[in-house]
Image: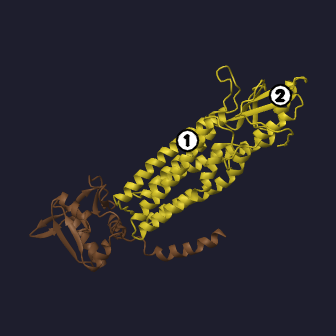
Amino acid sequence: MMWRHLIPGVICISLTACTIPQDSSYSWQKATVEELSIGVIDNPPFAYKSNSKWEGIEIDLIKKFAAMYGLDVSFTQANETQLFKDLKNYKYQIVLGGIEEQSIWKKEVALTLAYDSVHVMAIPKGENELLFHLENYLHIQLK
Amino acid sequence: MKNLTSFEYPDQLQKELRKAKKLEWITLVYLISVVVLMYLVMGSSQAMKTAWLEDALSTLPAISFLIAYRFYNKKPNKDFPYGYHRIYGIAFLTGSLALFLMGSYLLIDSSMALIKAEKPSIGSIFILGHQVWMGWMMIGVLLYSSLPAMWLGYRKLPLAKKLHNKILFTDAQAQKADWTTGFAAILGILGVGLGFWWADALAAVIISFSVLKDGFSNLKDAVLELMDRHPVTLEDKTKDDLVNEVAQLVNTWDWVEKAGVRFREHGMVYFGEIYIIPHQSKKTDFEKARNQLKNYHWKIHEVTLMEVREIPDYLVTAPNGGSRRNN
């Protein structure tokens, strides 16, 4: 009897499984429809300006990520405190620039896996679809 | 007065007690594996954290039972002239207090998570190069934490009733209902997966309520037992009819004019007194009475018989005519 009740639940979960995880504030959807907004901490060699263009290890990584999904990217520079404050308010989808796994911000934002076993990127909390795609990409870079 | 010896269950219940002990060992090992696995996958989910603490706490009844099992039937001595039966009551009290306090903490913690709109981020794990969302791992662990627990609960419940063992009973009941907390946490995780951040904190609040409710009712029960209330049945907490039966049995003795009895629970067994106003014309026979009580029911462990001139009205008395039971 109990199994009969479980069947609709199992079907439901199976149907929605492909669309899980999703964001609570549509960050990934915004990135695909509008653009991928990146907040940048000027911190060579991870992210720095050279001849008024953004360069660095993490800038390259994120450009490749955007290219993989066909996303437009915009970079905005500010101080760290302002960037994290804006990230929490969903002004950016990602903040990067040599952030370490043990960052003081780790309780306030979500951090990705470390692409080089130390450095991570920050995204707003609860944005699990964006995190899913970003971690998938960063994992490939790890190999 | 009945001699205080080390308590032994009747033969048929000895087997059940050994079975219960074995099941509590299995429970303990199983719960430790659940707690470790949950810790590994819980991430920042509030529902997982709450379910994890609940599972960690649910090791307490099993530990209490196994510790109390070592002491409860030690012989009375000059330091502990009533024996060691109350060890079950103490273990039950400490376990329920822990459950109650943790339930309160979890409820506040989960409500704060809901009020502060803390959104859980659940990352991924890579298994053989394949990306798996950690939420699925959490759901797998939650199923592992619920289904075997339910089976253990169903196995322990009849044993607890037969043995009149409160720790075993509450442990079995909590485990039998464990699927509800597991299910709530699973819905919380699925909710997060579908973008509803509040589902996680809401599931945590529901789980906290269930911990708090269990903690409160167990604590109340433990305190009432230590207050020496009239013995009650495990299941519906109604007054155990055994006390009435003893009162009726005493009334069948022809040398008894009027009698009143009272009993209190010491762990699994009852201790009590029988106040008797004997017939003036008949010879009292305390020795026969003692033997009859000794063999009446295994729960009646120690009875003091005393001759009095008046029966206090708070004692259980019975009209003439008695009944017997054979278990």
* Circle 1 residues within 10 Å: few <14, some 14–19, many ≥20: many
The image quadrant of residue B177 is bottom right
* Circle 2 residues within 10 Å: few <14, some 14–19, many ≥20: some
From the viewer's side, name the closer residue of B319 and B92.
B319
Residue type at numbered disc 2: Arg
The tint of chain B in the picture is yellow
SS for callout 1: helix
Q: Residue at x 24, y 64 (%)?
A: A87
Q: Is the residue B267 above or below the residue A123 in the image? A: above
Q: Residue furthest top?
A: B78
Instruction: Decide if residue B114 is on the left or right side of residue B172.
Output: left
From the viewer's side, name the closer residue of B210 and B14.
B210
Q: Residue at x 49, y 65 (%)?
A: B187
Label 2, label 1: how far apart the Cα atoms are: 36 Å
The image quadrant of residue B7 is top right
Letter of the chain in brown: A
Residue under disc 2 on the same chain as residue under disc 1: yes
User: Mark 2 or 1 closer to N-term?
Assistant: 1
- Where residue A107 appears, as percent x and y from the top left, is 31, 55
The image quadrant of residue A58 is bottom left
Q: Is the residue B10 above or below the residue A51 in the image? A: above
Q: Is the residue B268 above or below the residue A64 in the image? A: above
Residue linked to disc 1 = B95
From the viewer's side, name the closer residue of B239 and B16.
B239
Q: Can residue B130 be seen at all in this image of the molecule?
A: no
The subunit carrying tag 1 is B
From the viewer's side, name the closer residue of A44 and A83.
A83
Residue linked to disc 2 = B290
Residue type at numbered disc 1: Gly
- Where residue B165 appears, as percent x and y from the top left, is 68, 42
Residue A14 marker: none
Q: Which part of the image, by quadrant, shows the C terminus of chain B?
A: top right
